[in-house]
Amino acid sequence: MSTPTCTISVIYYSSTGNIAAMAEAMGEGAAAAGADVRVRKVRETAPPEAIAYNPTWAEFVEATKNDPEATLDDVDWADGIALGSPTRFGGPASQLKAFLDTTGGLWAQNKLVDKVGTAFTSVSTAHGGLESTILAINNHFYHWGSIVVPLGYENEHLLKVSGNPYGASFVARKGAAPDDVALTAARIQGERLARITAWIRAGRDAQAGTESAS
Ligand SMILES: Cc1cc2nc3c(=O)[nH]c(=O)nc-3n(C[C@H](O)[C@H](O)[C@H](O)COP(=O)(O)O)c2cc1C
């Protein structure tokens, strides 16, 4: 097996599976680019009575109860991080925010500086806040001192089909699961994150090698 080009953590919250599917696709894209990848859900913090009110949410919680949960080591370990959340009233879900709010210790040790970050989301309505959610997630990267990688429009799929340069996005009309358009955008974003992260890591490693030799 060849040496991984970089390490990527895909860290997400999902209550009914849309973001979970996109997170898997993001991880596939990063792995295809040669990265060592971890895909991790953040802990559910909603009370059981809130979850029970929505059968789809309850089924998803049950189906994913053994999936690995994100830890601070997944943040520390990764050269690049993709953060995903469904849109909640135009911003990220509190569950993702709760996890991110535990990264203060890493931040205080400067361990988040120069990580490469990107964000993705899903909504139920076309103008329901995709970009505001991605921008709000990206605020964490600015405070971490990370390098933000937007999805952009680098190929025909992004330019003519999926069409959101902020990050992979899915509009879940009437509860539909993510389609090929959204999953392809997520794969492209994962590949792009890993490609750029690998460049940065290679440059950092080369500089560290030069300094230790001199
Ligand atoms: C409390 C709450 C707030 C939501 N707010 C928005 C919103 O602002 N805009 C929107 O389009 N969809 C909104 N949605 C819908 C979800 O973002 C959407 O269904 C998403 O695709 C779910 O992703 P998931 O399956 O990964 O949980 C909201 C859903 C809930 C439960």
Image: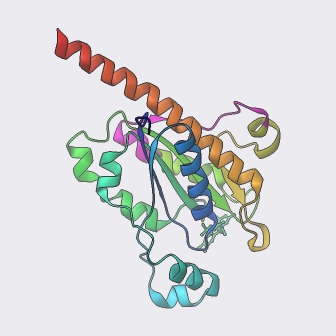
Q: Please tell me in which quadrant of the rendered image residue 164 appears.
A: top right
User: Is residue 56 inside the magenta stretch?
Assistant: no
Q: Answer above or below: position of 152 versus 134.
A: above
Q: How many marks?
A: 0
Image coords of residue 22 (percent x, y): 62, 57
In percent of width and height, residue 180 lies at 76, 54
Residue at the extreme right of the image, as rendered = 160
Residue 143 lies, in percent from the top left, at: 37, 42
User: Which residue is rendered at x = 54% and y = 79% of the image?
Assistant: 63
Colour scheme in the image?
Answer: rainbow
Figure quadrant of the C terminus:
top left
Q: Is residue 144 magenta?
A: yes
Of all residues shown, which one is farthest toward the front? 1
Q: Single out the residue that lies furthest toward the top.
A: 214
Nearest to the observer: residue 111 or residue 30: 30
Residue 64 seen by the camera:
yes
- Asked if 79 appears above or below 65 in the picture, the reply is above
Quarter of the image that includes the N terminus: top left
- Residue 87 at least partly seen: no
Ligand 1 sits in which quadrant? bottom right
Q: Residue at x 42, y 61 (%)?
A: 97
Left-right relation of 50 to 115? right
What residue is shown at x 25% (from left), y 13% (from top)? 210
From the viewer's side, name the closer residue of 49 and 37. 37
Q: Residue at x 57, y 54 (%)?
A: 133
Where does residue 206 sit, x and y in percent of width and height?
32, 18
Residue range of the region highlighted in magenta in the rendering: 139-156
